[in-house]
Amino acid sequence: MPASEDLYVLAPGEGEDESDGWVSPRPIDEAVGAAVADATDLDPEGIADAESYVDLDDLAALLDGEGEGDSLTFTVEGHEVTIDGGGHVTVGAE
């Protein structure tokens, strides 16, 4: 299984949001934690590593273009997180 620190996705950087039009590659754990924290009132430090919520092999296959679909959706702390094949992270409503 790939280490989560080896997987990068696209997410707004520190102090940025998607409306700025600027995204940068971020480690999966950091990107998912920040995205969930931004969409909720949760503390990103309290969100477990991505491997607690999603199979990292499936995620790596998606990001490499070898996955079975266009995106992968999983639940983090009661919120739907979707990562598309381009590595963009979005968080749905509760």
Image: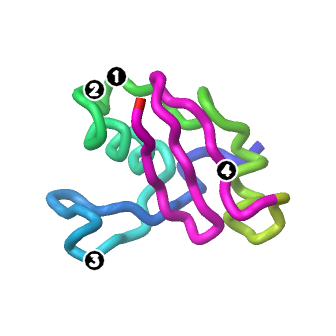
Three-letter code, disc 3: Gly
> Residue 58 vs residue 33: left or right?
right
Q: Quadrant of the N terminus?
A: top right
Task: Give neighbour class at mark 1: few <14, some 14-19, many 20+ (Cα, 10 Å).
Answer: few
What mark, if any, has residue 21 been given in the picture?
3
Q: Position of residue 80 (x, y in %)?
A: 52, 37
Residue extending furthest left? 15
Residue 17, horizontal then vertical, whole percent: 23, 62
Q: CA distance from mark 1 to mark 3?
A: 28 Å
Residue 60 is one of the magenta-drawn residues: no
Give the residue number, with chain letter if any, for mark 1. Answer: 46
* For residue 65, side relative to residue 41 (left or right): right
In the image, is residue 79 part of the stretch drawn in magenta?
A: yes
User: Of marks 4 and 2, which one's residue comes earlier in the chain?
Assistant: 2
The magenta segment: 69-93
In the rendered view, tell whether residue 60 sits above or below residue 1. below
> Tag 3's secondary structure?
loop
Is 16 left or right of 10, judged from the image as shown?
left
Q: Amino acid at mark 2?
A: Leu
